[in-house]
Structures are given as structure tokens and as C-alpha cells.
Amino acid sequence: MSDSFNLEIVNPEKLFLSLDNVSEVVVPAFEGDMGILKDHISIISFLKPGIVKVFTGNEVKELYVEDGIIEFSQNSLSILTSRIIDIKEIKKDDLSSMINEANEALKDENLDDQKRFLANQKIDVLNRLN
Amino acid sequence: MASLDDLKKRITSVKSTQKITKAMKMVAAAKLRKAQESAEKGRPYSDKMHNIILNLSKNINDKENAPKLLAGSGKDNVHLCVVMTSDRGLCGGFNSNITKKAKSYFKKILDSGKELKIVTVGSKGFDQLKRAFKEYIIENISFKESKNVNYFDADKVGKMIIEKFEKGEFDVCTIFFNKFKNVITQIPQEQQIIPLKSEKSDDKNDVMNYEFEPEEDEILNNLLPKNISTQIFKAMLENSASEQGSRMSAMDNATRNAGEMVEKLTIEYNRSRQAAITKELIEIISGAESL
């Protein structure tokens, strides 16, 4: 296919996903969702908690990420993230424990604005999944 | 000479030691495979992270205002050393190799009149360093409860280091760990993580013009703390593979030595048994002759 590019998703433990026929990826970049197609300009950005959508042909894969950095150059996209879960494999119990974790973090009075925003965002996304 | 009974007891005891070391070797071999695998799987992440940071720092023109984690605090007075060792012993020279390397580094720092602070990760390193450097050790972390190396442990260490850095408690941070080369060779390493040492790569050709969203320094501020955790995680992975490799070869040697010992003891046992029989025969014969 001519309009596809490479995608690599890595987390610290392993290479999570590696595809070479991706037609579009939508990532929750820090300043708003971003759709990446082939021949996108080289870009580095970081992610907020949200859903990464990977389009391959007619298939759509949805993955929950907690944070991460993306780098796109020469038609290959790398996503580095510390926590990533396929939405289909996510369990109700895990979800609620993750929501609790985020709520717990929010209680910290000394949290700076950015962290507070990220935690709120996380709760939002998780609640939508729940 | 030891009596027959004593020899017999010793042989049995050496044999059971041999059994233990053999079992430990097997366990280490199985764990090694796993640890090696995860060390290899972890490499893409830290490599990619490293590349991105390299690209970013090349794009930063204003070195003065670069984040402190990258550029350092501008001073070189207080050194923080993170010594990463295992929580268990019986793994050959694994722990003492790291501490040896660390100790010579400590001496260098102290001799040049700088201040030294030590954080030990893993209880064995703490045990070995507390005798000579007790007053410098500010923290001792151990992950005995975690079965496998995981990122969240590394992140904890990383966050602690960054917190201390932001409070201005140290200027330079170096980590010590064993790099896994193969089962027999592990190389003790020192790696400076704050300020970040960028390798001298002058080939400007591969400098890409990236678009940044948000600004470079904001990304760097977000990325650098993660990089520290990643480096520590990498060190932990390398360390755990090295530990198992080192234990495996140590236990292999121990098993072989025990085998040699059993052989020697068996020969000695047989000789003294024969000597006893001969002695008895002589006694009987000479008794019969005197009649």
C-alpha cells in the first residue's frame, strides 16, 4: 500500500506493537488530539492520558495510554509510553483501581497545575471507558 | 588421620552441598534466560528515548536556558552515587565488582575535596559499603518484595533522585551497575546521568528538522525526568541479567569443585578402609604365627 507507514509502540518492558501498514494514527497529544497520516512533517510531541487509535486497512485498534512521547520522522512513528493497554483487554477492576489511583493523586495539595490537569484528564478518559 | 566414620560424614555433606549448588545453577540458568530476554526487550525503549533526547538537544540553541537536568547546575561540588547491586548473595564477584568500582570512584571524589553522597539500591551493596562509607550513605533502597524488575520501581528511584536534584542536594549523579555482556563476563559500569553526557557525535548530517509541539524546552522538561527513570530501569535490567549470569557461573564452579572434593575424599576413604583391613589381617597372621 502506498499510503501506509510504520508504527512502533514501545514501553519499558518490551516492544509493544510494531506494524508497517498503518494508514492513520490518532494520538492524544498534549495540546489536543492529533491525526497522523503518511508524509507528515517530522514532529516530536508528548501525550496526555487518552486513547491512541491505530487504523490499518479497515481495522481500528484502540489503546489506552497514560503518558508518552511520540516521534515521527521519515514515515515511521514511534510512541514511547510507560503504560499502555489494549482497550479490549482492559478489565473493570483494573479500571476502577486506576481511577482510584488518580483520585488519590489529586488529593495532594501541592500538585502543580500541569499534573492536576493530567490527573483530571486521566479520570475523564477512564470514566468514559468504564 | 580422620576416622572412617568422619570421612563418610564429610563425603555426604559435600555431596549435599553439591546438590544445592547444582540446583541453584539450574534456577539461575532459567532465570537468566528470562532476565536476558527482558533486558533485550527493554533496549528499544531506552535507545529510542536516547535518540529523541539527542535530537532535541541538538535543536536547542540557547544552552544557557537549557533545563538543568540536561545542562547541570553549573557546579561540580556534590556528587551523588547510586550503587546498584543485588539483594541476594552467592553470585560470585557480582556485587564486589560493582562496589570495588564504586569505591575507587569514591576515593577519587573525596581526594579531590568534593562532597560525596551515596544511595545504595539493593541490600548487598549497602552491606559492603556501610563499613567504610557509612557516613556518606544517605539512602538505602531495596526491592526485595518485587519478584521481577519492573518499571515502577525504577521510576521510584528516578523520582527520588530528581527530587533531590531539584532541592539542590547534589550537582552530579552517577550510577554504578554491571553491564551484561555474556554469562561469563559482566562489566561494571559507571554512567553519569545528571547532567546528561551527550556523546560526541559531530555528524551533523542526521540532524532532523523537527516540529515541536509544544516548545522544545517544555518537551525536554517532560522528557528528561523520564529519561532518568529509563536509564535506571535499563541499569536494573542489565544488573538482573548480570546477577543471574554471575550466579550461574559461580554455582557451576562450585558444583565442579564439590565434585573434585568428593573424588578426593572417596579415594582417601577407600585407602584408609584398605589400610584398616590390612592392619587387621597382619594382626591375625602375626597372632597365628606366634602360636
Image: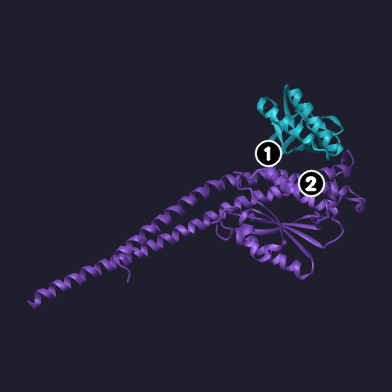
Q: Chain of mark 1?
A: A
> Which residue type does callout 2 highlight?
Pro
Percent coordinates x, y for residue B263 in the rendering: 36, 62
Taking A128 as reference, is A11 above or below it? below
Q: Residue at (76%, 63%) from the top-left corner?
A: B116
Q: How is the image coloured?
A: by chain
Spatial distance from mark 1 to mark 2, Cα to Cα?
Answer: 21 Å
Percent coordinates x, y for residue B62 in the rendering: 93, 51
- Whether residue A27 is visible here, answered yes or no, is no
- Colour that chain A carries in the picture: cyan
Picture disc at residue A15: 1
- Colour that chain B carries in the picture: purple
Taking B46 as reference, is B131 above or below it? below
Percent coordinates x, y for residue A104 in the rendering: 75, 34
User: Mark 2: which secondary structure?
Assistant: helix
Left/right placement of residue A12 relative to residue B268 reads: right
Q: Residue at (75%, 29%) from the top-left corner?
A: A22
Instruction: Let me know if marks 1 and 2 both belong to one chain.
Output: no
Query: Quick one: which residue is furthest to the top in this view?
Result: A58
Residue A76 location, quadrant: top right
Front position among marks 1 and 2: 2
User: Mark 1: which secondary structure?
Assistant: strand
Residue beneath label 2, please? B225
The N terminus of chain B - image quarter: bottom left
